[in-house]
Image (spheres, coloured by chain):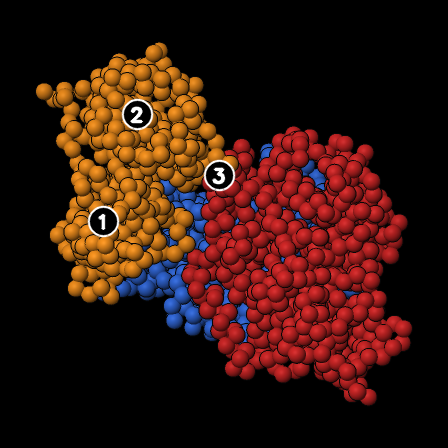
Amino acid sequence: MSKKYDAIIIGGGHNGLICAAYLAKAGRKVLVLEKRHVLGGAAVSEEVYPGFTFSVASYVVSLFRPHIIRELELAKHGYEVIPMDCSFLPLPDGDSLARWADPHRSRREIARFSKKDSEVYPEFSRVMTHMGKLAKAVIDHPAPNINSIHPKEIANLLRLGKAFKDLGPDLLNLNIKLVTMSALDFLDLWFESDVLKAPMSVSGIIGTFQGIRSPGTAYVLLHHYMGQLDGVFRSWGFSKGGTGGVSMACARSAMSYGAEIRTEAPVKQVLIKNGEATGVVLENGDELYAKTVISNLDPNRTYLKMVGESHLEPDVLKDIKRFKLRGSSGKVNLALDSVPEFSCRPGDGDHIRGDIAIAPGIDYLERAYDQAKYGEFSTRPYINAVIPTLTDPSLAPPGKHIMSCFVQYAPYHIKQGAENWPKYREAFGDTVVDTLAEYIPGLKDKILFRQVLTPWDLEQTMGLTEGNIFQGELSLEQLLFQRPVAKYSGYKTSISKLWMCGSGTHPGGGIMGASGELCAKTMLTSRAI
Amino acid sequence: MPLPTPFFPRTSALCHSMKWKEWAGYYAVCSYETLHDTEYYAFRNSAGLLDVSPLYKYRVTGPDAAAFLSRIMVRNIEKLAIGRVSYCCWCDDHGKVVDDGTVMRRGEQEFFVTSADPCYSWFSRFLRGYKVELSDISDQVAGLALQGPTSRDILKQVCDADLDGLKYFATCKARVNGFEVYISRTGYTGDLGYELWVDHEHALKLWDAIMAAGKNYDIRPAGLDALDVTRVEAGLILKDVDYFNALHALIDDRKSSPYEISLGWTVDLDRAPFNGQAALQAEKEEGSKWAIVGLDIDWPQLEELYYKRGLPPVLSNHAWRSSIPIYTAKDKRIQAGYATSGTWSPILKKNIALATVQKKYDKIGTELQFEVTVEHVRHTVSAIVSKTQFYNPERKTFTPKSSKS
Amino acid sequence: MSKTYDIIVIGGGHNGLTAAILLARKNKKVLVLEKRPVLGGIAAGEEFHPGYFTIGLLHDTGTVRQQVIKELNLAKFGLKTKARPAIGLLSKRGDCLPLSADVDAAASAISKFSSKDAAGYKEYAAFVSAIKPFMANLLNELPPDLSALGTKQLWALVKKGLALRWLGKKTMMEFLKVAPMSIADFLNEKFETDFIKAGIGAPALYGSFNGPWSSYTTINLLMGESMAHEQIAGGPQALVAALEQAAENEGVEIRTNAPVEKILLDTGRKVSGVKLKTGEELKASIVASSCTPHVTFYDLLQPNQISYALEHAVKHYRSRGTTAKVNLALNKEVLFNNVGGLEFYRTGNSFDEMERAFDPAKYKQFSSEPLLDIHVPTVANPNLAPAGHSVLSILVHFAPYNLKEEWNEESKKKLYSIVMKTLENYSPGIGSSVVGSEVLSPADLELRYSLTQGHIYHGEHAVDQLITRPFPLCAQYATPISGLYLCGSGSHPGGSITGMPGYLGHKPSLKIVESSGK
């Protein structure tokens, strides 16, 4: 039995493709297996309706690591992200708040709601950018293993300790707050206006089954200020051709280094012999062998489906079962006949070229969460919408537009049972459109086509367990050396020669590419491949 | 996207050079003509009229207004007499400067404060416990600086105030064609001059009145480029150039105390607690690390460097504001500090700079080395530490009719 | 001429008295100033209805630290401890589970409902006792100093880390895993019966602004469990009585009815004494305040006497009170779910219902079915009421301080009827036996006990406010104001009746007195 490949990567999401590219670049023979007909996983562009290319799931690019772009020559392979200039918040009373890259413009907008906040806003950005150094120290390296006394691990721990110490006492203490406080409490340290705090606080809850008042949600706020440290002016942007554009650039890069990629090749299981991964078996029964297997799937799928409980030690099984993957969001994509116009600020001006938040107040967001807690989708949800066609007209026919809406809360476990989601899918879609129509009066007449993805759908099509977009909640006990499980973090698994490279590993979440990159680099430096 | 100031209809019509910059979110003229020289000479020989509306302006009123401002400012505002203006700075807890500006006492319980950075949020943090009303009137009050030797004569034509009796750093209310204007004898040119504060609705009328009256006194609209030359000559420091707002600084090294930026004279320590008092007291006792000094940069040496390359000395007529290393005279490897702004002074015929140097090099007459680049090659020339106030005409403070006599 | 003391302690609660005794023991001249006519603060017993008495605003004394009792020699002054009595966990189905302090007894009681839960409880209790050494290290010692990051401070941190590592790898990893969790997630792993989970988890929510599904509530639960120890016979007021005697014995001067108006500073910004509301001035170069941080810095000092950093820290120290108190005088002995004779009961019923009880607090409303922490002091001490009658001391969660409709007689009446309605679930007909009652809203608590926003713990038990309590500037009991120290529940290790803030808080001030006395 010859092992044709050095590594088989299960799943062609952006992390899997990046991992493949790094390994192929280092001369390894790599095969990527994607179950769907398109690559990208959750970072995928698809022509769901004729002429309209949707970023079906993930819709903006935020923390994609710049060194990956450099090292994998992604620009050459078509990577192009156009930064967003504005965050727009329409309000039900006819007012609105737009926050711009231009600081004075933002100051004047915010001053309408609170003079104090308008002046504190840049101060907050400065502090957060400063603290972003720490986040960078965290996400650009494998997590330290606190159980190991290997000199390399101790050095890694010391490096992290130094990053903390370098913050100085004031920022260190602020960092304690950042990690443990709720997004709202943390913002309360600076701001007084609900109109500002509401849209800012949602950064802390996106993709989590938590409310803006839940402790531990403040940390994610920091991610929004890190882009600037990388020399990138704005951290949020649209990928040319939809978010699938990022994945395709990664795929082309991987192929240019010699990686092999197969689509419509669903893997049924990892082949395990004597406690060691030897390859995979496809749904069609084909067996493929490799020296190592790397899973881009979430920890739940990797361990419980690809490996199987029988191969797991009891404490690993326990930790995998307690790993929280609570989907809390859905996605509604609209194909529109013309530009949607907000009654509070009509026209197709720059204010709708960035992200648009339906988050008109603290209580609104909290009530949306309250419903989800008891197993209902929010009747008035938080919506983060973008109209990428204003920035990238190639996505739709001339004059037509796409509105891509991220919707929270839509709990995977509705009280009727997750498997009954399909029955409520259209009702959920209606809720979203109704909510938007309160701000965009003519919206319903403009809709040519509507795609509704519930957490159930995200699980069924993308393979995200419980529809969790981050392959696991970003709560403290599931980060760093505890992502996904304390005993096997650092991209290794409890099965010899089986590795993980998805968002369910450190640092996890969003289109960052860091998990794929760090997995490949860890494997290469440890000579696992 | 900057906004127009209330004077924009006039300034934009006159700005033939199309040289604008953004100042605090507003359009501001750099120079009306391609070269700013005539505007500079207007400031020094006749009168220049400058739109200073982008400054931030606050009104503080109430029974505790003086106590409240005294708690914030390094100067004791309770001692400021009605009708007087105080130039001062304000500090954080650690005695590091947040911003500088002027405080005008318009009444027993009424003050007018100007600042370079938005300070409403900073001031309002100290409101607890004071019977005070703080309002940001930046968007309601327009400002004009009328500066230069003929400014008093011009102003006399347009208003009813007793300008011959108005002393340096005094303020008064006046009427111009039926509307109210506050006049303060202050400015940023180091010359005789006034600043006028008026409600937006009367702004254009004020501009027109002054320009009409100034016709016979060679008035000129002037921009920020000319102002920058005059302020260096006068040794007046500029926030974000010669020092940084302590609240904006990410590292402590970027912060400065009043003593370190030549504002030690404004600090009044022996009084009720105020922001930064303990730290400033300690610094006064222990000494400061840094000082802002004037540098008189040796011209013959610079000439020599150019001549060696077969060139006449070429200096920009613009004031510069980039950081330039300063070395000790003895050893060019030892950095004594850095110059933060400077200019060729047309009136003094000197190449001058403002520099931050370690305290041990701040004695007047100390020789230092100033880095220059001539034809892409770095050199140093000698620079002598001098007073920051390079130019200080008598007319700046002279009052024709002294109220005492 | 005004009187001079070495140290003035503001507030005659159990922490203030503890600090005063320890300071006086070092031959210092100590004065305690209490604004109320009685000592004890939230630990003071009150006659709330003619002939009916409570034993304190808070009623659990199982948290009093053993080393405080020992070191103050309180047994000598009449303090008696007794085994922690069982707590009746109530379900709406009519069950009452007596949760004994004895693990085996508790587990066997639980096994009547679920054998899985009985096993889960043993596992839970074993985990709690495994982490106790580490928690004790955190609670009983001075907190780490994060105001500077020198070698000394870092070493202290490393020591805390080692104390955790010392628990063994497995316990350490489990602790790191569960501490940030919500109690719902944590207890769902171990238990299946709703009301048992809810009853065990409930204390984690006391004094925090959280529901059972909020992250980091497990750390609060574990902290509370690690502190649980023997009870004081006679409750909080018995503790106060012993402390008062001990104070007298050490020569502490105590003045009640002596509300402080201001802490006085000299021209050098150092403490010089205090001024009473009566205008009387008392001199001391050290003042230790057992009041809340807000009262100490905002009310007792002038605004320009505190730095901006301190101003900001106090402003953002979170102490959103969510607890009300209802005291009931009953004309008979009370049964809950047909069980009588227990001293403590807890309602909750399920995490869902607890979460729903918390939800309204976010919108400035009180729970429509609150979580009740019930104490029946007359079980142990029948003298607190006429013979055959009983007293219920009920802490009601959640009733927010900043109530939208504002706290007044009407809103208190509404709260009272909601509490009664809730009680009816467990003790049908209880309403008809009420002969007297007292409702204390968070606003009342603020007024009576100077608890800022009525917060029973002088500030929320949230992780950041526990690591550096109340905030980094004052986390070592010393304040930025020379001569002013904190020794109340707003300091490490936090609220409830422990005596620890007073015990640990006396040390830094003592150091100063002794060094200046030399």
Element at label 2? strand
Can marks 2 and 3 be said to lie on one chain? no
> How much space separates mark 2 and mark 3, taking CA atoms?
30 Å
Chain letter of disc 3 in the image? A
Kindly report which numbered mark, 3 or 1, lies closer to the viewer in this rendering.
Answer: 1
Which residue is located at x 28 percent, y 64 percent?
Answer: C514
Q: Amino acid at mark 1?
A: Pro
First in residue order: circle 2 vs circle 1: 2
Q: Nearer the viewer, mark 2 or mark 3?
A: 2
Residue position for label 1: B312
Residue displayed at 50% across by 61% down? A133
Residue B220 - label: 2
- In the rendered image, the vertical position of residue A5 relative to residue A360, given as above or below: below
Image quadrant for the C terminus of chain A? Answer: bottom right
Which chain is tinted red?
Answer: A
Is residue C159 left or right of B269 when viewed as pictured? Answer: right
Q: Which chain is blue?
A: C
Q: Quadrant of residue C147?
A: bottom left
Cα distance in 3D space between marks 2 and 1: 32 Å
Q: Which residue appears at 61% of the width and 43% of the height?
A: A87
